[in-house]
Amino acid sequence: MQFPVRQKVVAMKSCVFALILLGAPTAANADKIAQPKYNVLFIISDDLTATALSCYGNTVCQTPNIDAIAAKGTRFTRAFCQGTYCGPSRASMLSGYYPHATGVLGYKSPRPQIGDRATWPQHFKNNGYYAARVSKIYHMGVPGGVLLGGDGRDHNKYNGADDEASWTERFNSPGPEWKAPGDGETLEGNPDGKKPVVGGNTFVVVEADGDDMVHSDGMTAAKAVQLIDTHKDEAFWLGVGFVRPHVPFVAPKSYYPPFLPYEKMVLPEKVPGDWDDIPKPGINYKTSLNMKMDVRRQKKAMGGYYASVAFMDAQVGKVMAALKKAGIEDKTIVIFTSDHGYHLGEHDFWAKVSLRDESAGVPLIISVPGSKPAVCHSLVELLDLYPTISQLCGLEVPGRLQGRDISPMLDDPSHSVRDAAFSAAPARKGFLLREDKWAYIQYREDASGGIELFDTEKDPQQFTNLAELAEYAEVVAGFREQLAARLTAVRNNDLDITYR
């Protein structure tokens, strides 16, 4: 279209004004954009407990590629998610707000709540970075959201609760999930062994035929490798989302031998009467009892989970090899984490949602070029990634963010930014305040659902609930007051949200 001269000038000014509003590159920040400090490679696994990684002490499940990131970076031992299932955790981490600040307590995009505020990858995109995601970064249902065929959706185009504004480009990785050919068994709700392999949020193990590229995570790694090669000469923020070890536990057969026969798997300690002092909301939604999993099935569930972790770790290795091949290891910050943790039979609990350490805690590794390897025991939150990585890359850190800059911990692991980590299980109306010594869990804001209090120094596996004991009444009262104040502070941020 040809504009008259006057109209052309007005149109150009309007475009420049629009770019400024959107935070796009302008002359004022051209130097910063022309010479970005680092690329960002953000790798996130789905439903991964730190206890399954060899760099966190597992001696059965070996994860050499994740271990290699930890060997160069800082491994955090007390990192906590802000929501103990996928939707609220991811929305919180990427938006920069706690779930109860935005009201995103389920499986929705945070965009309607945050308006035009930039998400973490969008902030980098607005500052001249190529920003892309491969597979699940925001919430996307697994297995249904990645299932290749069978439900009428085009999973090459199905984006779940994704936020399009966050990305320059986005890519999906459809796979066969529980329908993969191979040897499969449904472990959950199948005591007589007659149920076929089923989909949904169900414990299923499939020792699959074929190689890595049959599955979603194999395709995700291949696309990430391609994108690293294509964009190696420009600044990028690349999110690589692996869906394993989320159920179904599906991996090529070649990953299973270290965990066979399943009978050799060692289940966590069982304590008689373990649930007797736990309020009803504190008993997880998936247990050995309600899933009708006997010991054989429990051990197979653990072996299938570990095989899925080993498969995912191999895909991480492919992505890291691409970074090295591209010659940009010394220009790229690498983050490895999960959206939340996972129970593997502790307290006879399975899966996520619980506010115990196994579910609320996450693996977190940050590797910055030139930094010395370290292990950090300070309390951190996934919410801290947005401000921290922005700071490390020389970008402005938006003052509205509710996370904290933990970059000083990379040079001084003893550095601390908070006395307690804060997490929530919205489906259970539960809240966690996790200090160095205490784990305080409260159900409902008025505590009418019950309270749990654990001295994690004396009772690290959280077997003895102290909340009802008279000698701990003052500790409980202090935490109730602290939690009420925390929720008020979270909700009084600058979001125009009506709370219910």
Image (spheres, rainbow, N blue to C red):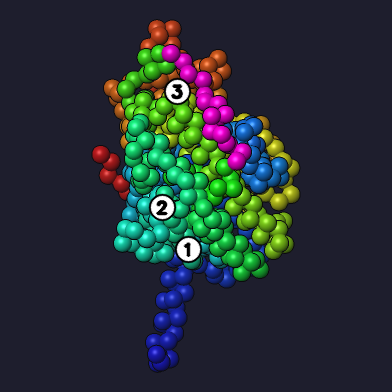
What count of labels does the image hold? 3
Q: Disc 3 versus disc 1: distance between alpha carbons?
A: 39 Å
What amino acid type is highlighted by mark number 2? Lys
Judged from the image, the secondary structure of the residue bearing numbered disc 2 is helix
Q: Are marks 3 and 1 in contact (CB under 8 Å)?
A: no
Q: Residue sitting at 45 percent across and 57 percent down?
A: 175
Residue 231, picture quadrant = bottom right
Residue 62 rendering spot, x and y as whole percentages = 64, 39
Report whether 350 appears left or right of 49. Answer: left
For the residues carrying marks 1 and 2, which lies nearer the camera in this image?
2
**Few, some or many residues within 10 Å of mark 1 (<14, 14–19, 20+):** some
Q: Disc 2 versus disc 3: distance between alpha carbons?
A: 31 Å
Residue 179, disc: 2
In the picture, which quadrant includes the N terminus?
A: bottom left
Q: Which of these two is toward me, 21 or 177?
A: 177
Seen in the picture, residue 55 relative to 225 is either above or below; the reply is: above
What amino acid type is highlighted by mark number 1? Phe
Judged from the image, the secondary structure of the residue bearing numbered disc 1 is strand
Q: Disc 1 versus disc 2: distance between alpha carbons?
A: 22 Å
Q: Which residues are magenta?
A: 257-272
What amino acid type is highlighted by mark number 3? His
Determine which residue is flagged by label 3.
347
Q: Say whether disc 2 or disc 3 marks the residue closer to the N-terminus.
A: 2
Judged from the image, the secondary structure of the residue bearing numbered disc 3 is helix
Q: Residue sitting at 55 percent across and 26 percent down?
A: 266
Residue 473, picture quadrant = top left
Q: Are marks 1 and 2 in contact (CB under 8 Å)?
A: no
Q: Residue sitting at 28 percent across and 22 percent down?
A: 448
- In the orientation shown, which residue stands out farthest toward the left? 500
